[in-house]
Amino acid sequence: MAEQARRYPGMHRARGTGNSVWAFPAAVGKWRRSGASVYPSMHLGTAPLKIGPKRCLGVSQHAPRCRTRPAPLPCASHNALQHGRLKVRPPDAARRRQREEKLRLYRSAMAALLEKEARGELDAEALALTGAVLAANPDVGTCWNLRRRALPPDPADCPTGPGTTGAGCCAAPPRPPPAADERALCQRLLAADPRNFHAWEHRRALAAEEDPEAELAFAGELLSRDFSNFSAWHHRGRLLGGGPGGGPGGLPPPRLRAELELVHSAVFTDPHDQSAWVYLRCLLSRASPPPRILCVYVNREDATLAVTFSRPVAVGGAAPALTATLNGSALGGPWHSGEGRPRPAHTWLCDLPPELAPPTSRPRLHFRVTWEPDPAHREVTLLPDENEAWWQEPIRARELFWPEVGVAEAGVLQAQAETCRELLELEPRSRGCLLTLVLLLSALDPLAHEDETRRCLRDLQEADPLRRGFVADVASRAAAAVGVLRAEAGPGGALRLRLPGKALTSLPLLEHAALVTHLDVAGNRLGGLPPALGGLQRLQVLDASHNEVTTLRGLPPLPRLRELRLDGNPISHASALAPLAACPRLAHLRLAETPLAAAPEAAAHLAQLLPRTAVALA
């Protein structure tokens, strides 16, 4: 400490703090080190900062000597410095009584409001009570809901009053305000807290039939003060999202250009703020496309009809009807999920009449599948010399990774990608910019931009270590999209999907791989085999070696699977492989380099569990 005092003459020992804590002057003059560089003036607050054994100023002990020696700033007369901390005097008795009285009035007004709501008396007095409560606490969601219910449906029927917009706390109940006063109330509360979600929702409910330009101007005014106001961005997006548009993204081209310029101003002002990036992605998006049929597959030997959708759907009960006809007659069999679970799924299966399976007969079979929300129907014909037939929609490359993209013009997406590249040259660790660029590149051409997308995802994982799992799932979807587009067709109708060594943490987009026969996901980070594999009714060979699979629980039956490789996975119990007993054609199973392979009785347990399967433990 003596050395510190010698190096920093402005230091003084804090009074009553012992020998180990030193105070530093609050105002420090210019620093100068050898050479021409001069550090700007530093203002460290109004109270002395302490230097102790576990706390420092962030200034090196070898920092240059201070040019001036300002005197320590005195503490305020009503504060005291104890144990190196500034102790603020507690409120006096008068202030405490004032707070208690305000709390009493708030509670009584809230109780009276709830009593009137229980009696169904949402009148002018109830409206005044809501204004009084919101003036004291603007975060009471119940009060906002009751206020909307108490407002007359016709704004012309709203009499005015001085106390109903929350100007005073718990004043006497006068008459209710007009609709303009409701907006004034929201504006006053938003001026105090620009992110008051209840006030924003109340304003949106009032502005549902008003001029949207005025609301856009109001949101723009708040954004001009603070670009990080996510509520203002959300309000702006809600106003723009519902109207008809004549241009890309549902907006006319002039409006879209104006919004993009506003976003560019925000992201170049603060590239690390996420609100403007979220707004940009919403601006370029549309509502999620409705589910549609992607593939219809029929197999004569398995007597199964499989229908695969673009999104998980529910079938049966009150859900939209999924119907199928065979040679003009309706199939009466019930539909069951390909994932083996009673929940919405991508693939639904229907059992065919057993008399159609060979060698009983081999007639010509014509299937017609209809789903109620989609007026179009899908048809598949199975000839007598065929065992399987299918219909599949052509893959839309731009919808694999970002199906919600709503901008049809590639030039708009390309311009935004160039903007992101320019910004990354200045701020290479901007998380929102990296994620947005990944989405744009995948929407433009996932194959042509594969390397740049992978590089951006790697940088995003380093820039956002707290969301490594999310980024890993995004990278898995990007790799799966490229793999689906590069699926290889083989002899005999074989279709191979290769995804080895891609660091996959999940297996998305399997609905676009419904006809795959060989799937290679070796050398990844999969913690299990997903139930969505049940939609791959043609899957024959699955290589999931050297992953992180510990159990196959939840794996549905795979009717044509004949070879499964699980080498190098941390599988330690034979019971973890129990779902494989439901795979009727499984002939080969590899379990080398697993804890189960080293167990002394593993072979006996596996022979009992899978009597028709040849298991390789080495």
Image: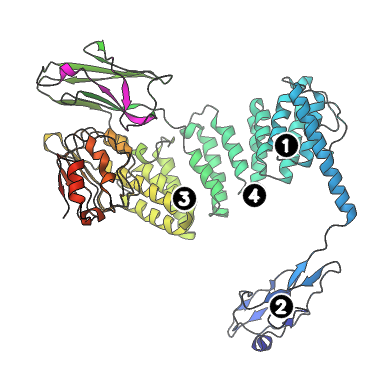
Asked if the residues shown at circle 3 and circle 1 are in contact, with their CB atoms under 8 angstroms apart, the answer is no
Report helix, strand or loop for mark 1: helix
Estimate the spatial distance between the alpha carbons at disc 2 and disc 1, rounded to whole Å.
46 Å
- Does label 3 or label 2 sit earlier along the sequence? 2
Assess disc 2: are there few (<14), some (14-19) or many (≥20) residues with their C-alpha within 10 Å of its C-alpha: many
Q: What amino acid is found at the position of numbered circle 3 in the picture?
A: Thr
Q: Is residue 260 left or right of residue 510?
A: right
Q: What amino acid is found at the position of numbered circle 2 in the picture?
A: Phe
Residue with the mark numbered 2: 24
Marker disc for residue 420:
none
Question: Which of the 4 image quadrants contains residue 217?
Answer: top right
Assess disc 1: are there few (<14), some (14-19) or many (≥20) residues with their C-alpha within 10 Å of its C-alpha: many
Residue 275 x, y percent position in the rendering: 56, 47
Report helix, strand or loop for mark 4: loop
Q: Is residue 167 left or right of residue 25?
A: right
Assess disc 3: are there few (<14), some (14-19) or many (≥20) residues with their C-alpha within 10 Å of its C-alpha: some
Q: Residue at x 12, y 15 (%)?
A: 363
Residue with the mark numbered 3: 419
Q: Is residue 533 above or below residue 466?
A: above
Q: What amino acid is found at the position of numbered circle 4 in the picture?
A: Asp
Residue with the mark numbered 4: 226
What is the residue that sits farthest to the top in this orientation? Answer: 329
Magenta-drawn segment: 332-360
Q: What amino acid is found at the position of numbered circle 1 in the picture?
A: Cys
Question: Quick one: 448 or 154, which is closer to the camera?
Answer: 154
